[in-house]
Each structure stands twice: as structure tokens, then as C-alpha cells.
Amino acid sequence: MRSAHPISENEVELTAIRAQGAGGQNVNKVSSAVHLRFDIPASSLPEHLQERLLKLGDQRISKSGVVIIKAQEYRSLEKNRAEALRRLQELIDSVSVVQKARRATKPTRGSVTRRLEGKARRSTIRPAGGVSNKSLSLIYGQAPGPEPGPIGDNHRLGFQSGAIPVLAPSGFTPELPIPRPPRAPRHVGHPDRRFSPSRPTGQEHHRAPKNPAGPGHRQRYRKRMKTPERLEPLVTDGLVDSVLRQLMSGKEATVYVVRCGDDIRCAKVYKEANKRGFHTAVDYTEGRKIKNSRQARAMAKRSRYGRQEQEAAWQSAEVDALRRLAAAGVRVPTPYNFHEGVLLMELVADEDGEPAPRLNDLSLSEEDALAYHAVLIRQVVRMLCAGIVHGDLSEYNVLVDAGGPVIIDLPQAVDAAANNNAKRMLGRDVDNLADYFGQFAPQLLATRYGDEIWELYESGALHPDSELSGHFEEAAGDVNLDEVMQVIEAADEEEEERLARQAAARAEGEWREGE
């Protein structure tokens, strides 16, 4: 179908960026996604269409009147480019159609008659949990015929032919069951209601004030859901009073809103290893220290006990990271307890006590995008100064409350000094932030904060207040082969020592089994 107001590609700014999502098939290595910008006030559209677009209230339209569309459904750059243009044209066509004016009408005589007849039929139907209207008329002495019979001392009621006579002695008041009112639909007032505009948006954690203001906050969480099996130990031990509702279900955990005394908190229930999205967890667990030597040997052998201990270490890693980052001044949720594989932590909320939205759910202006990007880059620096790299930082793992961005989801956090993948993961985290904020501030797409931060970290010059420019130049120079060979020889010696320790541990285990 041909559009009435086609848009020339000269009025559209198209930028190729890297697609987000799970890796594989070069999805994170090539620029296959398309970022489209269309300035409404500066376009050739008629003025009445420009006014309708600006009043539309679409989240893809910024405050300055710029349409921002990101297309990454396909792995082909050309298909994503066509998809972005199609969405823009569809948005313009939606305001081009003039809705037909509605006029008030009256119900017809036939519809009125059918409605009254239906009400008359329903009046004879037996209500749920009570007695029929016909039985009520018999007991109280009102015959179903046109003329009810007299009621007196031991008088027999007069009925039409075929009616069953009922005796009603004088002064006797029959005890009738009180009919129950019709049951309300399941979704009305239920905490699991699906289609309710007042239901908070989903995210992993949100921070709520200890004593929420206003009567509506307690009213929102008045009802509770059935306690999930994984949360029953916390309820039994008194850590949680009741489970209010499920907040969200992600690739690694399910989060529930719970009540602990007068506080509203969230409980993060980690999924089992075969149900998690981190199938390459070995890249994240490299370098994590295990103090118990027996547990370390069991993890290396991948025995049943070793797999259980490895799963427990994965779950408890987020608690340790949250405490370290909070001490370093990073804005993260505060952990309260970790019990039976469940992390009990505070909720992140906005000024009204509603769950704080994710960064991905916000439509930002260029100024806001630059400010949020600067804050998050500073948080990344503070995390690296504390020896931690997030490893999965993106707009989906950042909440925005009244105080600014809050970083969440840290079970995959890596040790910057002990993990060989730390540099690559830090660069990926910083690039994810640049790609997202680059939709609103394109100048961020050309920055190289990741390489600059890591160079300062390796040289020992990085501190929480280090000044960053976003520019980085590779150091050019001749390679010192002697130093390279020394590093290789040292690595070989370290590997031989590690193999010798493993052989000695196996021999000791076999000797003990032989005893």
C-alpha cells in the first residue's frame, strides 16, 4: 500500500551500530543494527502532521521532536535499514488518517424489549448458594399466580392448579439461607492481574522507602500470592512474612516482592545451572578463589558434590560483589540476607514508591543521555578500582530511581586481577553503554572509554576520580622479543607446576582409597 506522505531518505539520518543480544553468528562483532533519527520540525511534512506527531506521546519521539528508531531484528544491515524506514513511515501514516466523528445514538425499540425480556428470564433463575425467587414467594406466601392466597393462623395458601401447598403458622419466621453475591472475576483486585495500567513495570530489583508515604502503598501490596517452594524456608525461619507477587523472571533468576515486617523487599531465587542463560560460566568463574581445598578438588573433578559446591559459589558471588561495591561507593541494591539459595535484598523505587524503571524503558533527551552515560562510566571506574568487572552490563541491568542509575545483576561479576577475560568483558560493558546512549547522543559512538580505563588500570594510575577523555591511541613501537620469550617460559613453568600438583593430589587420593 502506497503512503500518502512518503519520506525522502535525505531527511533521515541512518547509522549502523552493533546489535545487542546473545552472542554467536557475529551478532556482536559486526554493525548489523540500524539507528534512525528523523527531525520532525525540520522535515518537509505538512504542519498539521507535524503537530499531530508531536502530540502523539510516543516514547520513540524525544522532547526536542526527534524520532529515534532502532532496528535489530535481522542479521542483515539492509533488512534492518528497510525495517527502520518502514516503522517511520508507519508512524507517519498513523497520524495521516482522520478518524470519523462519532455521533450519539439511541437504542432501538427491539433492543430495549430484548433486554427487558432477558432480565425477566434471569429473575427466575436460582442464585448461587441461595434459593430461587419462586421458592421465596412460596415460603412467604406469595403465589406465582396473579392473585396470591390469604395468609393466617394455619391457613393453607391458595395456589393455581399444579402448585405445591405450603403451611405457614402464624408468628413463624422461616430461616432462609442468605444468597451469596456473584463472585467477582478472577483478575479484579488480584495481585496477579495481567492487564492493569497500575501494575508496576517488570525489573529485577527496586528500592522502596522503609516507611512508604501515603495509604496507597500498603493497599497495593495488601493481598499475597501462594508461597513458592524455594521461598518456604525463608517463611518458616521468619525471614519473610509473606510473598506478595512475582516481579520478574530473567535468564538467571526469578524475583518476588515479599513483606518483611513493615518493609517491602525483594527475594531473588536463582535458577538451576541447566536453566540459566550463562552457559559459558567458566569465562566468569575463572580466578575465583575457593578457600576449602576439598571443595576445590571436587569442583575440578566435576563430581556431584563438586557441582553442588560450584552452584553454591555462583549464587553467593553476587552477595560478595554487592557488599564490596557498596563499600566502594557504587550505587547497587543493599543485600540483607542470603539463605537457601535465595538473596533477600532491598527494592529500588522512584519517588512515588513505584518500582524504578529500567534504563531501557526510558526515552532520554541528548542532555540526559550524556549525563547518565557519564555517571555510569564513573560507576564502572569505581567497580574496577574495587577489583570487579560487571561482565554483563547493559541498559537492561540498570535501574533509574530518584537519585540516578542503580546497577543490578552481579552473579557473573569477575575478578579483574585474576580473570584473563576481564579486559574483554570491561570493553564489552563500556561498548554496550555507548551503543545504547548513542541512540540519543551519536557523539558517544566514537568514544573508547574501555581501552582508556583499562590502560590506566594496568599502569596503576586508575583511581575513582581519574579524568577521562574517551580518546585512546594505540602505543606504536617495536616488540621486545626477549621479554615475550621470558613471559612464555614463565607461563610454561607455571603450567608444569600446576600439572605436578594435580598429579600429586590424584596420587594421594588413590593411596587413601587403597587403604
Image (cartoon, helix red, strand yellow):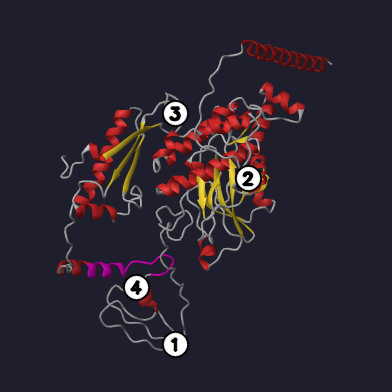
Locate residue 276, reporting x and y percent.
Answer: 54, 34
The mark nearer the N terminus, 3 or 2, is: 3
Locate residue 251, reporting x and y percent.
Answer: 51, 37
* In contact (CB < 8 Å): disc 4 and disc 2: no
- The residue carrying mark 1 is 170
Q: Distance between the residues labelled 3 and 1?
A: 89 Å
Relative height, residue 454 to residue 324 (above, below): above
Numbered disc in front, either 3 or 2: 3
Under circle 2, the secondary element is strand
Under circle 3, the secondary element is loop
Which quadrant: the N terminus?
Answer: top left
Q: How far apart are marks 4 and 2 (CA)?
A: 60 Å
Q: Distance between the residues labelled 3 and 4?
A: 73 Å
The reply to whether residue 249 is in sight is no
- The residue carrying mark 3 is 28
* Residue type, label 2: Leu
**Residue at horizontal 65 percent and vertical 10 percent from the top:** 482
* Residue type, label 4: Lys
- The residue carrying mark 2 is 343
* In contact (CB < 8 Å): disc 3 and disc 1: no
Relative height, residue 443 to residue 49 (above, below): above
The mark nearer the N terminus, 4 or 2, is: 4
Which region is colored magenta? 115-131
